[in-house]
Amino acid sequence: MLTREENEMLTRVGRGTLAGELLRRYWQPLAAATELTEEKPIMTVRLLGENLAVFRDKQGRYGLVGEQCPHRRASLAFGRVDDEGIRCPYHGWKFDCTGKCLEQPAEPEASGFKEKIKHTAYPVEKLGGMLFAYLGPEPRPLLPRWDVLAWETGKRWIQKQEMLKCNWLQPMENSVDPSHLYWLHGGAAHLARAMDHYEETHEFIQFEYGIMKRRATPGKKPGAEREIDQHPLLFPNTLRHVFKMRETNGKVRHNLQMRMPVDDTHTQVYVVYFEPDETDRSPAGGDVPCEFFPVRNENGAYRLDEVLVQDAMAWETQGALTDRTQEHLGTGDEGVILLRKLLREQIDVVRQGGEPLGTVRDPKANRLIELDVINERIGLFGRQPQKVA
Ligand code: FES
Ligand SMILES: [Fe+2]
């Protein structure tokens, strides 16, 4: 149980809030690169409570600017792009990717007025087909080259989920909550047995990028005393996961589940999938296909036969920003308690001007960050042998 003040501190994302300032120290998912096209090169995005417009100029450079024009607040989302940047639809002021005002058609050239205008703008980088934005203070850290984004030995695609009506911390707490598996997702055949014999153990190990969640279940194969699976929570708002698909002949499917904090009560999930493949390979710098994943059907009901929707249902029904003054945590919530403690500590680190957990600044360490994902049940034992080509 938290106090109202603690709950606010850990969840609110706006500029100047405590969690909001922590989240601004990390690159955040923004969009799939293919959401911007030649025909539709501008898109509005709400990120960390800020209304923004992301665009691709005619040279292929990405920009992220405040949606409202600094002249008289028309939306730049209806603007036009050219070789140099984005132009407001109302009176034609033009801005480059850094927010510099390049033109003001109705002002005398000699007035120097445009030099006085600096529009809100944030850096954008592309990796694994995703665009990422950094909304924090300079010097910015490096965009982490997580394996699922940077591997070049297989194919990659993106799933954009229907926007969730809940705060970002609810999905993140779920990522360190292994005891929900059998109950929420218990319909799957391989989980059914464990519902009668709940005999697994959990460990949560803090490591350089977040929290390693490790689950041990009694082994099913002869001689196997126990089977481990291990998935890292990449602090503060990403889960690295892996599973094997029956419908793809048992191929291993790695994934990175990024929970983009839209505002205090909305979260946009992007999942990047990676499947090792001999012939079908996605370059780390290229575009990859993006599919939309609805949480509800055409009648507005949850599609509860989908595992990811079972989770989404749980997170949304906790409340848009769940009231943690009313909860009762037990031993099985050990991971949730650790995540909250880590958040509090890292909020303090930022408050004191320090560098929070997991930010990357060494280019050598960032060539490829391979994560120790284990799932012995599907034959994954420790580090994967994938390398960048
Ligand atoms: S409101 Fe944008 S140029 Fe006037
Ligand atoms: Fe789940």
Image: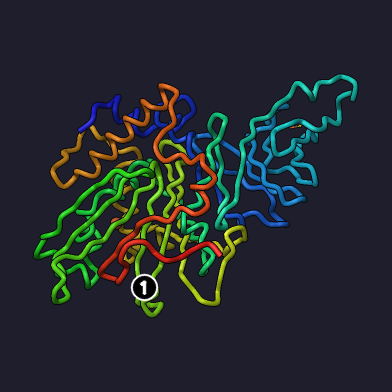
375 or 134: which is nearer to us? 375
Quadrant of res 167? top left
Q: Position of residue 243 (x, y in %)?
A: 35, 66
- Residue drawn at (63%, 47%), measured in percent from left and top? 43
Asked if residue 295 is positioned above or below residue 317 in the image, the reply reads below
Q: Nearer the viewer, residue 356 or 7?
A: 356
Between residue 59 and residue 12, name the one nearer to us. 59
Q: Is residue 58 above or below residue 254?
A: above
- Label 1 secondary element: strand
On the picture, is 375 further left or further right than 370? left
User: Along the horizontal axis of the image, is 220 left or right of 53?
Assistant: left
Quarter of the N terminus within the rendering: top left
Note whether residue 199 is visible. Answer: yes
Residue 194, percent from left and from top? 14, 65
Judge left or right: residue 274 versus residue 377. Answer: right
Q: Quick one: quadrant of the C terminus?
A: bottom right
Q: Is mark 1 within 8 Å of ligand 2?
A: no
Residue at (76% x, 39% y) in the render:
87
Residue, far bottom: 249
| Location of residue 295 (image quadrant) | bottom left
**Residue 24 in picture, x, y percent from top left:** 49, 34
> Is residue 166 at all visible to an observer of this figure?
no
At 39% from the left and 64% from the top, the residue drawn is: 384
State ligand 1's quadrant: top right
Identify which residue is drawn at 26% across, 46% down.
205
Q: Is residue 246 above or below residue 370?
A: below
Amino acid type at mark 1: Met
For disc 1, the marked residue is 245
